[in-house]
């Protein structure tokens, strides 16, 4: 991001253009009238300064990368190359026809559903068309259900704020030009006086001319120095403003989280309860749920179990056995929660490679609990929109769930989007999936310090699109690195085993990340 640079999302021209796109969005909402999912009336969106900053960050990232930045936890739309991103022909609203055809999956109709979501009240819009932008221009729009700061603005009010800022800048430039003009006039008067003196004093003409020439060079050099310092001051001022804006945005987010966490339970609509601690015959269990509107979490206790789980895998020693392994406690903890099961032979297969379909099933069992337990494999129908998800398979219901909530978004293969249920999954891919679940289903703020990752010897092997999520997983103790001769490695490209999945999942649960 080059703050204020021509074509950057933070440039004055693009900042002014953004409010017109919010007007266009409100015109679309006025035309559509109601939310297609709830039937509630659609009102005009208000511009939240925090969301404008978020949209600028997301759009500048997406201008160089095909995909959603997902740096901040918002509802995010992004488009490239169109003259009108809201077009019903080749823009976001084109997805309305897909939705009305019966395909309600968020992966295929999410842009349309964000625009026409009656619960979303506040927005920020950004445009980026600087050199190097993919397809020439990138549009980004972020939405939230609540206001992060003290005031939101209509497009007209926002334009007035921008005009006020632009007017103050124009006045400052005019004052500067007037000062330069006065200086030039004074310089001309001085030069005329010097010329008259030179004519009267022929003997000192040569020396005076030399002094004048030297003074001129000194003046030019001084002006260049002043100009350089002025540019540096402007850059420092812009950086300071950006740092203040970032601090204010984070403070607003923390304030909103504090407010939501202190609302009474009656103000929330709790989603599906999931078990994070299995009950035993001596201890009560714990279940967790998130508000479907704001994402804040709550817990409740469950009754003690009538009898303890006696699951034993022949190929996994129990945690109290002399030959127990590093993964023994994790595998049995995941089994107690009903998240992992053995093969028909009774074995668990800890060293077997985890497939993408298995990963989806394990997360589905955790987040959907009883709903997942009651779901039938027979008669399950592919609703992902991806051709390689077959009907009636052990993973079909889980794949439908994972794509609908945005936990797994598929892989681009030869221009098509595929789920690849039988394919392997790498450690960095699993970090992205866990982080998606934390942000979208547990209201986590994925703000990571990449210095933690930078300390790992193989940090350079992490792909750019996974850097933030891998950093976040490291910071939160979800992954701790693989020990190789006393040194910890991320091993981002290594395929995940079933034992590693059990360990990473139980770490995320124990850290309250999901």
Image (tube, grey):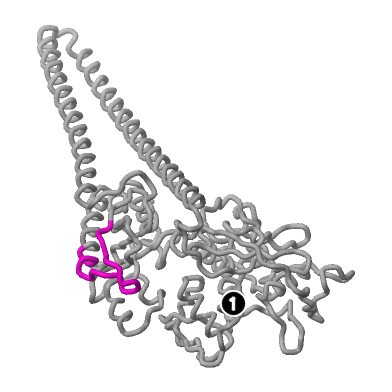
Residue 331 appears in view: yes
Residue 412 lies in quadrant? bottom left
What residue sits 23% from the left and 62% below the top? 26
Q: Main secondary structure of the magenta part?
A: loop
What residue sits 69% from the left and 67% below the top? 303
Left or right for 455, reference 24: right
Q: Which residue is mark 1?
A: 370
Q: Is residue 40 magenta?
A: yes
Q: Is residue 11 magenta?
A: no
Taking depth in this image into account, of 255 and 279 the one nearest to the observer is 279
Measuring from the top left, give residue 509's x and y in whole percent. Answer: 64, 63
Measuring from the top left, give residue 445's x and y in whole percent. Answer: 50, 55
Circle 1 SS class: helix
Measuring from the top left, give residue 285's x and y in whole percent. Answer: 69, 65
- Characterize the local packing of mark 1: few (<14), some (14-19) or many (20 or more) Cα atoms within 10 angstroms: some
Left or right for 110, reference 33: right
What residue sits 41% from the left and 59% below the top? 74
Taking depth in this image into account, of 1 and 97 the one nearest to the observer is 97
Report the magenta residues as a range: 27-45
What residue sits 30% from the left and 81% below the top? 100
Q: Quadrant of the C terminus?
A: bottom right
């Amino acid at each position: 991001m080059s703050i204020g640079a021509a074509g950057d999302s933070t440039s004055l021209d693009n900042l002014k253009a953004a409010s017109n796109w919010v007007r266009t969005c409100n015109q679309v909402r006025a035309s559509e009238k109601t939310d297609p999912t709830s039937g509630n009336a659609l009102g005009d969106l208000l511009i939240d300064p925090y969301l404008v900053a978020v949209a600028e960050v997301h759009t500048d990232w997406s201008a160089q990368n095909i995909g959603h930045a997902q740096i901040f936890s918002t509802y995010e739309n992004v488009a490239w190359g169109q003259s009108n991103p809201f077009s019903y022909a080749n823009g976001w609203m084109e997805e309305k026809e897909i939705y009305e055809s019966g395909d309600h999956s968020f992966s295929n109709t999410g842009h349309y559903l964000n625009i026409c979501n009656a619960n979303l009240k506040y927005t920020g819009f950004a445009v980026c068309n600087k050199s190097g932008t993919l397809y020439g221009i990138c549009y980004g729009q972020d939405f939230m259900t609540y206001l992060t700061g003290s005031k939101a603005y209509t497009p007209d009010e926002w334009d007035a704020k921008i005009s006020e800022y632009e007017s103050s800048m124009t006045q400052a430039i005019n004052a500067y030009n007037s000062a330069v003009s006065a200086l030039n006039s004074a310089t001309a008067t001085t030069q005329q006086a010097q010329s008259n003196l030179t004519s009267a004093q022929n003997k000192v003409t040569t020396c005076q001319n030399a002094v004048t020439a030297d003074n001129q060079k000194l003046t030019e050099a001084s002006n260049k120095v002043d100009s350089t310092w002025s540019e540096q001051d402007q850059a420092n001022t812009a950086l300071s403003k950006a740092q203040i804006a970032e601090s204010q945005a984070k403070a607003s987010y923390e304030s909103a989280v504090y407010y939501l966490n202190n609302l009474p339970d009656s103000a929330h609509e709790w989603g599906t309860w999931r078990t994070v601690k299995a009950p035993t015959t001596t201890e009560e269990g714990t279940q967790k749920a998130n508000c479907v509107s704001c994402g804040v979490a709550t817990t409740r206790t469950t009754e003690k179990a009538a009898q303890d789980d006696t699951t034993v895998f022949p190929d996994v020693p129990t945690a109290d056995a002399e030959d127990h392994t590093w993964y023994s406690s994790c595998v049995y903890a995941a089994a107690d929660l009903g998240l992992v099961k053995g093969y028909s032979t009774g074995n668990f297969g800890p060293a077997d490679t985890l497939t993408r379909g298995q990963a989806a099933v394990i997360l589905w069992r955790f987040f959907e609990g009883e709903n997942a337990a009651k779901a039938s494999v027979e008669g399950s129908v592919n609703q992902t929109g991806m051709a390689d998800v077959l009907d009636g398979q052990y993973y079909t219901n889980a794949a439908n769930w994972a794509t609908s909530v945005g936990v797994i978004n598929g892989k681009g293969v030869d221009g098509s989007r595929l789920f690849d249920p039988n394919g392997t999954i790498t450690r960095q891919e699993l970090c992205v999936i866990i982080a998606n679940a934390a942000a979208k289903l547990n209201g986590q703020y994925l703000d990571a310090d990449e210095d933690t990752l930078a300390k790992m010897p193989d940090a350079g092997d992490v792909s750019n699109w996974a850097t933030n999520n891998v950093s976040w997983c490291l910071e939160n103790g979800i992954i701790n690195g693989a020990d190789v001769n006393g040194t910890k490695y991320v091993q981002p490209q290594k395929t995940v085993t079933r034992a590693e999945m059990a360990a990473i999942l139980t770490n995320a649960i124990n850290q309250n990340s999901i």
